[in-house]
Image (tube, rainbow, N blue to C red):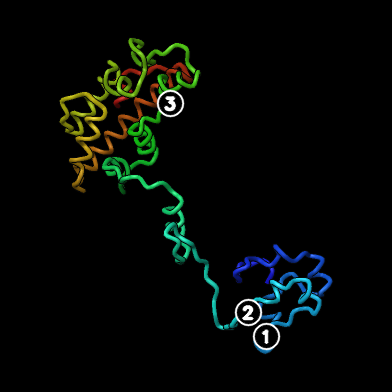
Amino acid sequence: MWYDNWSEMGPLIQYITYRDIYDARLPLNIKVSDIMQNGKWKWPQDWYDKFPLITSIEDPTIQNDYNDIVVWISKNEEKVRFSVKTATIDLGTEVPRVRWWRLIWYAQCIPKHSFIFCLAIQNRLSTQDRMAKWGLYTVNRCPLCQNDNEDLQHLFFKCKFSSEVWSKAKEMAEINCEKSNWQELIRRLANDCVNKNIGWVVKRLILAACIYYIWLERNGRIIKDVHNSSQEVYN
């Protein structure tokens, strides 16, 4: 009665104090039907003068066999049955579906590999060039080859260490991509990745594993000062 949004006025507790409810000897958990008699309101007598707006609410039709449902007012201002999917769509930002999702998420994927792969595609890995913008690095140097600054393109392609791992992985996965360019590789594979045969499953597994273990080696050298050879990383 007091807390639900059953009337156009909204929850009545916004207008009636707990003292008013107590003085009227009405329980807090009372239902709308409990304060009606023969289809008419039976408000406390002094409320007609004290709360004219509330006592002027039209007599509702009570259906004892009616089950309440939770509804959602969509962004189109339509009342629909509530679902998490509907709420997520309405509250989220609409963005076009990317083509590369097929490379990452599929039934046979290894979640931890796919997670790092997903971050890499969106350039959200904490490479030194990104962290330098936050003031966390004063010197940017690739921990794998020590020859150049570290960014996503260098880490996975231009770095001599990564190139050795990557060349073996491409040969095993039979991935033909002449240009060692991150965006070009993703675009090429996303366009070709339409088949569900075992060959494409293997290609995606190897690609994600290669990215994962290069990133793992990179972190191991920075955090633990542990150095493995490119052959050990590949194996």
Say if 39 sits above or below 23 in the image: below
Element carrying mark 3: loop
The Cα–Cα distance between marks 1 and 3, rounded to whole angstroms, is 67 Å
The alpha-carbon separation of the residues under discs 3 and 2 comes to: 62 Å
Relative to residue 58, is residue 18 drawn left or right? Answer: right
* Image quadrant in which you'd find residue 21: bottom right
Identify the residue at image location x=70%, y=62%.
14
Amino acid bearing label 3: Ser
Q: Is residue 178 left or right of residue 10?
A: left
Residue pictured at 30% horizontal, 47% vertical: 106
The residue that mark 3 highlights is 126
Residue 40 is marked as 1
What amino acid type is highlighted by mark number 1? Lys
Image quarter hosting the N terminus: bottom right
Asked if the residues shown at circle 1 and circle 3 are in contact, with their CB atoms under 8 angstroms apart, the answer is no
Tell me the kind of residue under disc 2: Glu
- Residue 33 occupies which quadrant of the picture? bottom right
Q: Which mark is residue 58?
A: 2
